Image (cartoon, grey):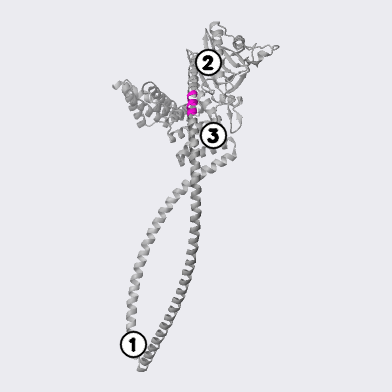
């Protein structure tokens, strides 16, 4: 045990010496803590039941190194924890959060491409949880990396389509402010000063509101303190004034008593007589005033009685008029009731007629519902047959390093179909778009699938031009186009990859091939003739199909697709999705894993179409024969 502890101390000291050049030196206490965590990890790693404690130790060690900017050591321990979570614990939450930490390390190191890969893993996990704040934080992390990589359109799309609606829905002021700030910064980097100013004003509004709220709180507390002090001071002043008033009153009483005593001593009899006469005059004036007041009260009473009589007379006239109007209204009401009863009778008769018609419609609706169910059941069964025909015995992933298939019929059954097979050392991948969609298109898919099975599997033909020529003839014969008015056919792309020669042969009837490598896209054009169709009527026209050979480099992606994806219509802009937009999207997602590419294509298509209905069947096949 002592020997193991000594070895662990040497390892910790050696690791610390290696990473001093990357970050700040670790203190002695930190080294002891790392040693203790490693001892616990070594002791518990042999027990699967303690896997949770083991990952906690690894995460803690990685966090210490990350804080000290020792990135390589931090990555080492985070990757060990990630492996245990994937193989033993299968904790999706822990896996996503470790990817976030690894992404943060690559961000600090300036490796934004690698950081983006890890943050996208966390974003996809948060989309499944639907936790508003955690999801907006994950979106913001990815948007920040898109800005670092100068992918400003992706940043704007993420914030406006995903983060901002969540912030509005939850009415979270801090999330709204963060979204508006990110958009203002992105539009500034993009050079769009108008939208930068618009979102900056929104961001500034939230900032001012928060500052004002904080100021208002401080101001309210200050006013409350001042109000308390003012009330205390008023009470003190009232007490002082009350005491002063009492002292003054007492002093005035004493002075009056003294004056009265002096007057009583100095008044003469003459002065007393004059005072008596003055009092008598005052009494007479009071009596006269009383008489005048009585006269005035009588006059007012007379006026009031006169006004009351006038009001009573006017009220009587108004009541008489009201009675006449009421009598007239009652007569009108009686006539109205008679008319209403007549209309009720008519309505009742009409209601009976409507009910009879409704019963007929209900019966007809039942018949139509039954027939519709029979048709739907038939189409559903036809879809089962079509799915069984299209689904292959092996997955395309078994033959290529990376691949995906998007197959979205517009209706229950599809006019598009895909086909792939491996013959010896060659892998054949085919995408076909038949005339029309729904049931008519589905019939053609059965013919096309049968012809491909015959030509490739049974006859062993792998040259794209020869395959196109054979199925063109087969469709014309199957539909008797030489002797009928039928002009149906299909557009098709055929890729044949030889894993020995590392070459890809391509042949297409109107459907081209897109090749994406190193951020550049190249279109390999197809021949202008379709399979079958009206061209068979042109007796003087000879179809010609060609095979084009491509040297496959590691990391090169190939995409074949039907025109259903580029023809999807956006009613708001009144434009189609277009091949140029699709090519731009492919160059942006080429570096992503196949499953994430598939998600990004579907997400961009849904955003373009909005609430509009899908206009055609969609098929997209992407594959990368050699990993980068």
Q: CA separation, marks 1 and 3?
A: 101 Å
Height in image: 320 above or below 610? below
Whether the residues at callouts 3 and 2 have beta carbons within 8 Å, the answer is no
Height in image: 284 above or below 120? below
**Magenta residues (range):** 363-371
State the image coordinates of residue 30 (x, y, percent, origin top left).
36, 31
Q: CA separation, marks 1 and 2?
A: 131 Å
Count every numbered label the image shows and give the total: 3
Q: Which residue is mark 2?
A: 626
> Helix, strand, or loop for circle 2?
loop
Q: Which residue is mark 1?
A: 262
State the image coordinates of residue 276 (x, y, percent, origin top left).
36, 90
Mark 2, Cα crowd under 10 Å, few <14 / some 14-19 / many 20+, is some
Q: Which mark is residue 156?
A: 3
State the image coordinates of residue 388 (x, y, percent, origin top left).
48, 15
Relative horizontal placement of residue 64, taking residue 348 as reference (left or right) = left
At 57% from the left and 39% from the top, the residue drawn is: 195
At 56% from the left and 37% from the top, the residue drawn is: 187
At 32% from the left and 77% from the top, the residue drawn is: 250
């Amino acid at each position: 045990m002592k020997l193991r502890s000594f070895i662990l101390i040497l390892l910790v000291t050696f690791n610390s010496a290696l990473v001093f050049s990357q970050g700040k030196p670790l203190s002695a206490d930190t080294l002891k803590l790392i040693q203790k965590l490693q001892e616990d990890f070594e002791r518990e790693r042999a027990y699967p039941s303690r896997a949770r404690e083991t990952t906690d130790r690894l995460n803690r060690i990685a966090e210490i190194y990350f804080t000290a900017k020792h990135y390589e050591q931090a990555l080492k321990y985070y990757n060990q924890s990630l492996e245990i979570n994937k193989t033993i614990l299968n904790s999706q939450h822990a896996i996503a959060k470790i990817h976030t930490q690894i992404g943060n390390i690559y961000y600090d190191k300036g490796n934004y491409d690698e950081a983006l890969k890890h943050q996208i893993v966390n974003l996809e996990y948060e989309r499944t949880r639907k936790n508003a704040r955690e999801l907006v934080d994950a979106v913001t992390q990815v948007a920040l990396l898109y800005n670092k990589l100068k992918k400003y359109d992706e940043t704007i799309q993420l914030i406006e389509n995903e983060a901002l609606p969540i912030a509005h829905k939850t009415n979270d002021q801090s999330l709204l402010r963060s979204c508006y700030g990110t958009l203002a910064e992105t539009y500034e980097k993009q050079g769009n000063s108008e939208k930068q100013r618009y979102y900056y004003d929104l961001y500034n509004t939230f900032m001012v509101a928060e500052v004002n709220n904080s100021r208002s709180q401080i101001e309210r507390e200050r006013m409350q303190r001042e109000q308390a002090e003012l009330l205390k001071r008023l009470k003190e002043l009232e007490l002082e004034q009350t005491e002063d008033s009492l002292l003054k009153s007492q002093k005035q009483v004493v002075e009056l008593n003294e004056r009265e005593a002096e007057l009583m001593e100095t008044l003469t009899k003459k002065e007393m007589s004059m005072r008596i006469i003055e009092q008598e005059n005052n009494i007479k004036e009071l009596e006269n005033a009383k008489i005048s007041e009585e006269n005035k009260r009588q006059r007012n009473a007379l006026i009031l009685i006169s006004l009351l009589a006038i009001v009573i007379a006017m009220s009587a006239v108004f009541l008489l008029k009201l009675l006449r109007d009421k009598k007239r209204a009652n007569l009108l009401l009686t006539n109205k009731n008679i008319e209403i009863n007549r209309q009720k009778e008519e309505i009742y008769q009409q209601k009976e007629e409507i009910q009879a018609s409704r019963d007929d419609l209900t019966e007809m609706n039942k018949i139509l519902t039954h027939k519709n169910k029979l048709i739907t059941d038939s189409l559903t069964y036809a879809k089962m047959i079509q799915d069984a025909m299209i689904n292959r015995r092996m997955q395309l992933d078994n033959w290529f390093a990376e691949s995906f298939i998007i197959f979205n019929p517009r209706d229950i059954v599809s006019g598009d179909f895909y086909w792939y097979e491996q013959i010896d050392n060659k892998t054949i991948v085919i995408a076909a778009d038949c005339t029309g969609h729904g049931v008519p298109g589905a019939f053609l898919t059965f013919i096309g699938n049968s012809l491909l099975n015959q030509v490739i599997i049974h006859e062993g033909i792998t040259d794209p031009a020869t395959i196109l020529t054979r199925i063109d003839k087969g469709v014309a014969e199957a539909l008797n186009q030489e002797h009928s008015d039928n002009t149906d056919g299909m557009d098709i792309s055929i890729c044949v990859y030889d894993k020995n020669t590392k070459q890809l042969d391509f042949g297409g009837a109107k459907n081209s091939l897109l090749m994406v490598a190193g951020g550049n896209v190249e279109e390999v054009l197809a021949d202008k003739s379709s399979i079958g169709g009206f061209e068979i009527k042109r007796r003087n026209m000879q179809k010609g199909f060609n095979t084009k050979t491509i040297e496959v480099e590691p990391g090169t992606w190939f995409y074949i697709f039907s025109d259903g994806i580029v023809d999807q219509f956006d009613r708001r802009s009144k434009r189609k999705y277009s091949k140029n937009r699709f090519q731009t999207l492919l160059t942006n997602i080429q570096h992503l894993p196949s499953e994430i590419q598939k998600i990004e294509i579907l997400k961009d298509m849904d955003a373009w179409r909005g609430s509009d209905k899908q206009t055609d069947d969609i098929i997209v096949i992407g594959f990368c024969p050699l990993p980068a």
